[in-house]
Image: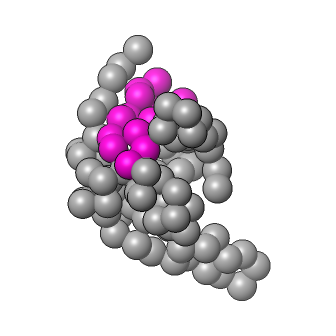
Amino acid sequence: MIGEVFPQSKLFKKTVSKSKHLFQVFDAWGIDAMYFTEVLLPNDYSIYIYDTDEHKHYKISAKEFKKHAQFFHFKNENEDHRAQIFCSRRNFVIDNY
């Protein structure tokens, strides 16, 4: 799991760089699928993603994320990134600060 979890407020925070972490095919942010399905979704966490490239905050509930999401598993000969779940940025509430 990459990110910070705040169980008492049901909040998951992740900091990303659009140029490095955005799944461009779907214009989507990703989360580790196992962590999402075992922790975030059953407890309907709020998901906050901060993009350091564009200085934008993306917000969505876990249930809304799942509603619009797709699962992918990326592997190459040197790395296995485990399965991830991706949701398009258009489904998030976006704040510019």
Q: Nearer the viewer, residue 16 or 25?
A: 16
Q: Quadrant of the C terminus?
A: top left
Residue 53 location in percent, x, y?
51, 31
From the image, give the main secondary structure of the stretch colored magenta.
Answer: strand
Taking the view exactly as shown, the residue that stands out farthest to the right is 78
Residue 16 visible in the displayed image? yes
Q: Is residue 2 left or right of residue 59?
A: right
Q: How many marks?
A: 0
Specify how the rendered protein is coloured. Answer: one colour
The boundaries of the magenta stretch are: 44-61
Residue 20 location in percent, x, y?
56, 49
Taking the view exactly as shown, the residue that stands out farthest to the bottom is 77
Q: Nearer the viewer, residue 27 or 66?
A: 66
Q: Is residue 89 left or right of residue 35?
A: left
Above or below 97: residue 33: below
Residue shown at the point (41%, 57%) measured from the top left: 41
Residue 1 location in percent, x, y?
64, 56
Residue 37 location in percent, x, y?
46, 65
Magenta highlight on residue 45: yes
Residue shown at the point (41%, 27%) measured from the top left: 56
Residue shown at the point (30%, 30%) measured from the top left: 94
Above or below 54: residue 43: below
Residue shown at the point (52%, 40%) measured from the top left: 12
Residue 53 visible in the displayed image? no
Magenta highlight on residue 16: no
